[in-house]
Amino acid sequence: MIEFEGVGHHYGDRTVLSDVDLTLAERRVAFVGANGSGKSTLARMVNGLVLPAEGRVRVLGLDPAKQGNAVRRRVGFVFTNPDSQIVMPTAGEDVAFSLRRSGLSTRERARRAEEVLAEYGLGGYAEHPAHQLSGGQKQLLALCAMLVLKPDVLVCDEPTTLLDLRNKRRFVELLGRLDQQVLLVTHDLDLLGGFDRVVVLDEGRVVADDEPEPALAYYRKLAG
């Protein structure tokens, strides 16, 4: 369970979140809103990338402000641009790098990396140069680098922005099959039919919070 209690945040004089109260227990939750609405800031609070200026956040009973390392061991984060997460030369090495603090041997890390790559559509790519993968494959690689750690929660901040429609659909369908609780920040509204809940933000406040159809209808009306 993820809880936001009276959460606010500012960048300089600009308020980006104000009086956010949410309890998120559903397996598939999407945050939508216009650019600058605060949705990415809210998502980044889940693993302590951003800390609230007011209020508090609880993630699986932990406080990211005080227990950041413990939270990040249980929360994976996938960014918009996978190139910002790929740090090793090959796909297999990149996934294995996530396990560097696991205590596993080099051989065991490589084996686990190959298993995860195969499970999520990149079987046979362990030796492939990571930065020569297609856009869709790079985003899968970034996902694998998180899933190899077996997090309880996966936060994805606009992960489909750089993908074509086919790969967008494939990526969101894959998220739907995961055991983890998934929080997705997105502008791709047509991909959210299978989600449990959609939270709409506008100017830093939650203005709608419902099942996908009514929440997205409200957002489309808001967007004009």
Image (tube, helix red, strand yellow):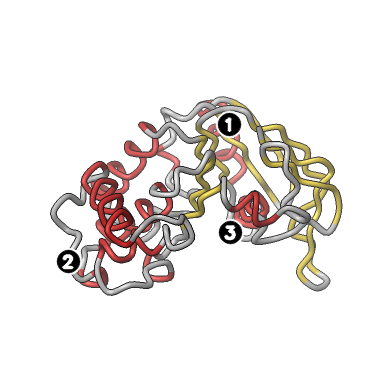
In the rendered structure, are the residues bearing label 3 and label 1 in contact, judged by CB atoms less than 8 Å apart? no
Q: Residue at x 17, y 65 (%)?
A: 127
- Residue drawn at x 65%, y 56% is 69
Question: Is 92 situated above or below 172?
Answer: below
Residue 85 visible (yes or no)? yes
- In the image, 123: left or right of 49? left
Q: Which residue type does callout 1 highlight?
A: Ala
For label 1, the residue is 215
What residue is pinned by disc 2?
128
The residue that disc 3 covers is 35
Instruction: Assess disc 3: are there few (<14), some (14-19) or many (≥20) residues with their C-alpha within 10 Å of its C-alpha.
Output: few
Label 1 secondary element: helix
Mark nearer the N terminus (3 vs 1): 3
Q: Nearer the viewer, residue 93 or 21?
A: 93
Q: Is residue 36 above or below residue 144?
A: below
Side of 141 where 157 appears, left or right: right
Q: CA distance from mark 1 to mark 2?
A: 42 Å
In the rendered image, residue 199, in percent from the top left (x then y), is placed at: 62, 37
> Residue 169's x, y, as percent?
30, 42
Q: Is residue 37 visible?
A: no
**Alpha-carbon neighbours of circle 1 within 10 Å: few (<14), some, or many (≥20)?**
some
Assign a secondary structure to mark 3.
loop
The image shows residue 177 at horizontal and vertical percentages of 36, 31
